[in-house]
């Protein structure tokens, strides 16, 4: 499986109809369809497709044709995400009608082509499941812990200074967390 960490935009045009595809991490999806409709008031449709892992590591998929003919927009977009094995992403495609009807097949190809275009410019990374790990340290070990976390490229770090110790919560891949545990025990 693969994923992205930032947003990307791709454009596709056929018979004067313009398709602007926005590929975003799933965390940025909520409210984006309404935002794009507000930014593109003359656009006819804002279609979406998404894939993400739920808390049980099951793939959840959804799509919307946004009043395009049933199955002519959302599903072709979703199929591109499936084909590229993208997870924890959403793609929203803004369509400006160019005056010439594309037909259902032409529309399905156009939406799929727009998604393929944005995927081709995206910085796709291998998906690695992340885990949380909590531990405590003394105040004198804060610098050592920070150094080790940076060295292992663990950047999702929360710490809380308590009365006599520091409470840490980190989030990273299982491999990096295990390396951190090994290194911290040596010291």
Image (cartoon, rainbow, N blue to C red):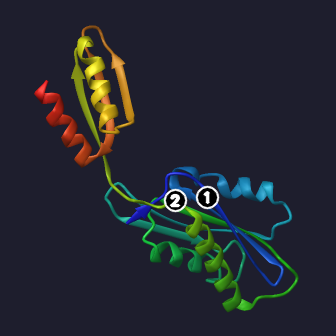
Q: Which residue is mark 1?
A: 8
- Check whether the beta carbons of the residues at disc 2 and disc 1 lie within 8 A of each other: yes
Rendering coords of residue 100 (x, y %): 85, 86
Q: Residue at x 24, y 48 (%)?
A: 174
Q: Residue at x 67, y 91 (%)?
A: 105
Rendering coords of residue 29 (x, y %): 58, 55
Q: Residues within 10 Å of mark 2 (few under 14, many from 20)?
A: few
Image vertical order of residue 55 relative to residue 62, above or below = above
Q: Secondary structure at mark 1?
A: strand
Q: Which residue is mark 2?
A: 123
Q: Nearer the viewer, residue 41 or 80?
A: 80
Q: Secondary structure at mark 2?
A: loop
Q: Residues within 10 Å of mark 1 (few under 14, many from 20)?
A: some
Looking at the image, the residue that sits furthest to the top is 163
Rendering coords of residue 177 (x, y %): 24, 41
Locate residue 98: give its quadrant: bottom right
Image vertical order of residue 170 relative to residue 131, above or below = above
**Reading the chain from its start, which is encountered first: label 2 or label 1?**
1
Looking at the image, the residue that sits furthest to the left is 186
Image vertical order of residue 41 relative to residue 45, above or below = above
Locate residue 1: give its quadrant: bottom left
Rendering coords of residue 102 (x, y %): 76, 88
Q: Horizontal placement of 15 versus 30: left or right?
A: right
Q: Horizontal placement of 51 versus 56: left or right?
A: right
Disc 2 to disc 1, C-alpha distance: 8 Å
């Amino acid at each position: 499986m693969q994923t992205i960490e930032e947003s990307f935009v791709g454009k596709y045009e056929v018979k004067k109809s313009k398709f602007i595809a926005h590929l975003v991490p799933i965390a940025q999806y909520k409210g984006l369809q309404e935002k794009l409709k507000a930014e593109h008031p003359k656009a006819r449709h804002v279609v979406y497709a998404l894939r993400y892992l739920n808390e049980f590591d099951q793939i959840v998929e959804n799509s919307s044709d946004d009043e395009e003919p049933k199955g002519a927009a959302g599903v072709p977009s979703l199929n591109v995400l499936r084909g590229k094995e993208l997870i924890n992403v959403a793609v929203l495609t803004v369509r400006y009608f160019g005056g010439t009807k594309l037909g259902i097949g032409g529309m399905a190809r156009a939406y799929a082509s727009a998604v393929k275009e944005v995927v081709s410019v995206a910085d796709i990374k291998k998906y690695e499941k992340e885990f949380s790990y909590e531990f405590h340290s003394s105040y004198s070990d804060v610098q050592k812990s920070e150094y080790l976390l940076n060295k292992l490229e663990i950047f999702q770090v929360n710490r809380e200074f308590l009365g006599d110790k520091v409470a840490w919560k980190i989030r990273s891949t299982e491999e990096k967390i295990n390396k951190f545990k090994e290194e911290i025990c040596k010291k």
